[in-house]
Image (cartoon, rainbow, N blue to C red):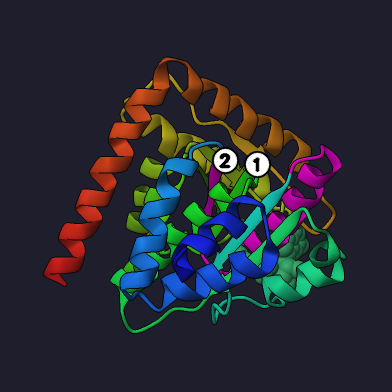
Amino acid sequence: MSRVQQLVVEILKGNRKAIAKAITLVESNNIEGQKLASLLYSHTGEAHIIGITGPGGVGKSTLVEKLAKELRNKGKSVGIIAVDPTSPFSGGAFLGDRIRMQGLSLDEGVFIRSMATRNNPGGLARATKDTVRILDASGKDVVIVETVGAGQSEVNVVGVAQTIVVVLAPGFGDEIQAIKAGMMEIGDIFVMNKADQENADRAVIDIQAMLGLSDKKSKWNPPIIKTIATTGDGTLQLLEKINEHRKYLEGNGGSMRQKTLIEMEVIEAIKQKTT
Ligand SMILES: Nc1nc2c(ncn2[C@@H]2O[C@H](COP(=O)(O)OP(=O)(O)O)[C@@H](O)[C@H]2O)c(=O)[nH]1
Ligand SMILES: [Mg+2]
């Protein structure tokens, strides 16, 4: 058996060391990494891939940590990929540190990996996609991908997710309406985090108005959920909506979504060629 084939066998067993090694391999973007990704493909498709995106500092990492805890309480295994966790806007700790604080990193049912922004945006998007594949093949029930979605193309990897959660907070992104409009199109679920802040209700009304303006292309009606990530308020409701969305995808919406994903990948590939 080749080194890559051995790695595949160990990944399928859920071997953590093998998973870590495999991610490093796909990050290096060489022939072996590509071979690994293609060998794993037929072992994927079971995990629910959730994209968590939104401007830096709105509380995405805090929310991911709470979601992971909630999922563990329900007996689900979780893979977490934090793309660009060192956003200059973020006042919080690295996601890895938070997870450690929560004791989640000692938990065999959780695997977390941070992907650094590199000079090559195409490389980052690809490595993230391959990492999702590795975690899916390793048997994780849920894979969460946190990305900064503020129009920075280098972290625009939401195309890998089945359910996209757009996280906003009062006062964030008001000045950049166009970016917000772009996010309105990709979101399956909207979260108004920092609901403890007094202008949260106003912000929810604004988002509702914006959602009302965008033309609906599917039967799914994107809900808006208020959360306080620091206390965990609303995370259970968010998880319920995420599960509802998965059920929706499994129904008649599934094939439609698949098409959208492929289209997004094509758009992404074209963008990378032209920039
Ligand atoms: N008041 C308040 N602060 C929050 C809430 N959620 C997160 N924060 C704080 O917002 C800052 C940024 O959070 P972080 O999760 O790093 O945001 P990210 O950049 O979107 O990942 C941190 O200081 C958090 O403690 C919330 O619901 N309410
Ligand atoms: Mg973060």
| Residue under the image location 72 percent in, 61 percent down | 62
Q: In the rendered view, would you say 59 is above or below 258?
A: below
The single residue placed furthest to the front in the displayed view is: 1
Q: In the rendered view, would you say 48 is above or below 20?
A: above
Q: In the rendered view, would you say 71 is above or below 172?
A: above
Q: How crowded is mark 2: few (under 14 residues within 10 Å), some or many (20 or more)?
A: many
Give the residue type at disc 1: Asp
Q: What stretch is highlighted in magenta?
A: 47-76
- Mark 1 Cβ inside 8 Å of ligand 2: no
| Residue under the image location 30 percent in, 36 percent down | 260
Rendered image: mark on residue 47: 2
The single residue placed furthest to the left in the displayed view is: 274
User: At which x and y percent is residue 161?
Assistant: 46, 46
User: Foreground: 208 or 149?
Assistant: 149
Rendered image: mark on residue 211: none
User: At which x and y percent is residue 144?
Assistant: 59, 52
User: Foreground: 219 or 262?
Assistant: 262
Instruction: Give yes or no for residue 10 being in the magenta stretch.
Output: no
Instruction: Give yes or no for residue 64 being in the magenta stretch.
Output: yes
Q: Work out whether residue 233 can be spotted.
A: no
User: Foreground: 108 or 219?
Assistant: 108
Quadrant in which the C terminus is drawn: bottom left
For residue 81, side relative to residue 161 (left or right): right
Query: Are circles 1 and 2 on residues that touch, CB within 8 Å?
Result: yes
Q: Name the residue under label 1.
A: 141
| Residue under the image location 60 percent in, 70 percent down | 20
